[in-house]
Image (spheres, rainbow, N blue to C red):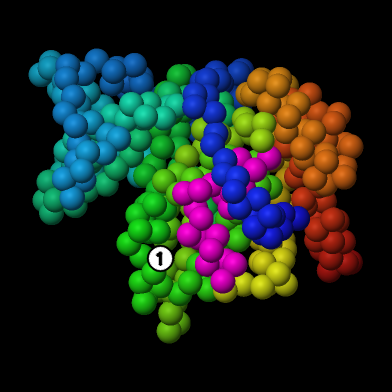
Amino acid sequence: MINFIDHINHSGQTEQPSRKKPIYPIKDDLRKYLVKYGREVKLPFAYSDLQKFTYTTPLKDKHGIETAWEKVSYDLHEWKSLRESLIKVYAILKTEGDMSYIDHLDVARIDYCFFGNSKPFRIRIINKFNDNYDHYYIKQADASRVYGLELEHLLSPNRMTYFTNKETLIEEHIPGIPGDVFIADYLNSKQTNQIRLAKEFVKFNERCFVQLLGDMRSYNFVVNIIPDIEDFQYRIRAIDFDQQSYEGRKNLYLPQFFKENQQLVKIVMKHLNHQSIEQYQAEEKTMMTFRLVSSRYRIKELLDMMNDDPISKPEKINELKKSLAEHFYNDQYLKANTMGQLLKTHMKQALLKLLKQVTKTRNRIAD
């Protein structure tokens, strides 16, 4: 179990992930898995088709500050066929491909982000009758990201909607307040219940570590504010899965060690004692264990495929397995030769004891 006190002992150290992670292709057995579970669908275009834009315009936020996104434009011939295809893909995401609802929809804008590994396009779909809009994303299909999306879908409290088609990945927009915006504009508001937010950050931190999901800096997750009896609850959701089981440094899988998240760490240390932190960590791992039991065959399929998938570099695998073995005093980590093997060992380390308890309880109830 990771101790938040570790952060105080290493307060001068902050983590930075690799500047550039390669795109790893989806291998044949992972493709079969995606087909089996309805993730692979036939699309009317490919990611490369969106790259045929003619020029871009910097996109500014509501304060007039340039963002990492640029609005892209296409020539008229290219735009006509692309526009129709983008609306059809939205229907696949939202209504299982029912095209009877698309006549009142249109593409309001396409944005492109040069920053990031997957070079995403963000598609804004608008309802022509009431101007309400929604977004989805088109990215390069990356095996690391697919594994991350699947693990999030199966082990977290969040359901993920995405599809692949060869080298193209389609993702539904994940709504919420970007973490960096929340920290700047909401964290110290009188309406924010910092104790409940601190609890959620501890759980999010634990979940990322168990799943070996890296690079959860504040702009890579969103915060949902949920009205509750007399107050609010909070849910922190990852939105970037490029760094699934890739980095070699252990602390890159712990959001508490990123300088961008330090304000959240401070409220944890201010409002929670050691016993409370351990309680919330145990709660999160217990819920992950319940989800593991419910989806155990599908998760086993996924981890078996990761076993021999080269989604990281040998030096990073060696670095991570040594640091995890040292941290947990468990030499089983040292036997891993791939990130998939390392993740399987890590999940056993984190959840096996709870898994045995849950299985024993269920068997007793069944008897």
Q: Nearer the viewer, residue 260 or 343?
A: 260
The residue nearer to you, when weighing 104 against 145, is: 145
The quadrant of the rendering that contains the C terminus is bottom right
Residue drawn at (35%, 54%) of the image: 181
- Does 265 sit above or below residue 314? below
Q: Position of residue 276 (x, y in %)?
A: 68, 72
Q: Quadrant of the N terminus?
A: bottom right
**110 sits left or right of 303 in the view:** left
> Dot 1 lies on which element?
loop
| Magenta stretch secondary structure, dominant | helix
Q: Start and end of the magenta stretch?
A: 250-270
Name above or below for residue 184 compared with residue 313: below
Residue 169 inside the magenta-drawn segment: no
Q: Give the farthest residue toward the front.
A: 12
x, y (%) of residue 74? 16, 20
> In the image, 85: left or right of 1?
left
Can the viewer see residue 74?
yes
**At 34% across and 16% down in the image, what residue appears?**
48
Residue type at tag 1? Leu
Q: Is residue 138 above or below residue 364?
A: above
Q: Mark 1 highlights which residue? A: 187
